[in-house]
């Protein structure tokens, strides 16, 4: 392994390289956060070097949630407690909605459901791919 394993980009805890079964009868590599509350996990890669590279570069552009736009703009959100830790979402102002008691972050889950969680980090959505017609 040529790259040094960096700490968790979300909570700062140490990280661990893991050799695991990805449920398709093939063993693969990934990196997980050792923190007790974060739960961050890198993508599953074919080699240890690829897993480390993905982990060490995966936080590019992430910013503290306190700096995120609160005007309904769609952004990528990170929340370790969500089913899908990295998701698209927005900040919802609930003023004037009688059954809602507080403003909140809304994240779209894998099953299409919308969930309210407290993300810790955000980044702008990437540019859409160029498609020729």
Image (tube, rainbow, N blue to C red):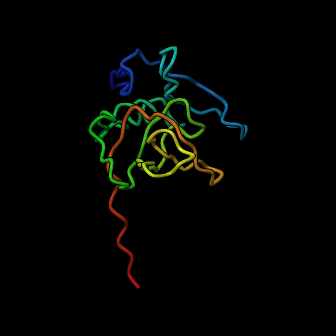
Q: Quadrant of the C terminus?
A: bottom left
Would residue 80 appear left or right of 6 to someone viewing this image? right
Residue that appears at 30% across and 42% down: 68
Image quarter of residue 15: top left
Residue that appears at 44% across and 37% down: 78
Relative to 59, say whether 125 is above or below: below
Q: Nearer the viewer, residue 50 or 97?
A: 97
Q: Nearer the viewer, residue 19 or 104?
A: 104
Q: Nearer the viewer, residue 125 or 16?
A: 125
Relative to 106, say whether 126 is above or below: below
Q: Nearer the viewer, residue 32 or 113?
A: 113
The image shows residue 77 at horizontal and vertical percentages of: 42, 42
Residue occupying the far bottom of the picture? 133
The image shows residue 132 at horizontal and vertical percentages of: 38, 81
Would residue 18 appear left or right of 23 to someone viewing this image? left
Residue that appears at 34% across and 25% down: 2
The image shows residue 74 at horizontal and vertical percentages of: 39, 55
Relative to 18, say whether 45 is above or below: below
């Amino acid at each position: 392994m040529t790259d040094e394993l960096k700490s968790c980009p979300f909570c700062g805890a140490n990280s661990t390289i893991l050799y695991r079964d990805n449920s398709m009868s093939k063993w693969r590599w990934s990196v997980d956060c050792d923190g007790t509350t974060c739960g961050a996990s890198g993508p599953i890669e074919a080699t240890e070097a690829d897993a480390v590279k993905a982990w060490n570069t995966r936080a590019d552009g992430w910013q503290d949630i306190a700096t995120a736009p609160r005007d309904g703009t769609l952004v990528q959100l990170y929340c370790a407690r969500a089913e899908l830790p990295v998701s698209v979402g927005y900040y919802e102002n609930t003023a004037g909605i009688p059954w809602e008691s507080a403003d909140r972050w809304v994240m779209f889950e894998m099953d299409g459901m919308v969930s309210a969680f407290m993300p810790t980090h955000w980044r702008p959505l990437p540019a859409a791919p160029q498609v020729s017609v």
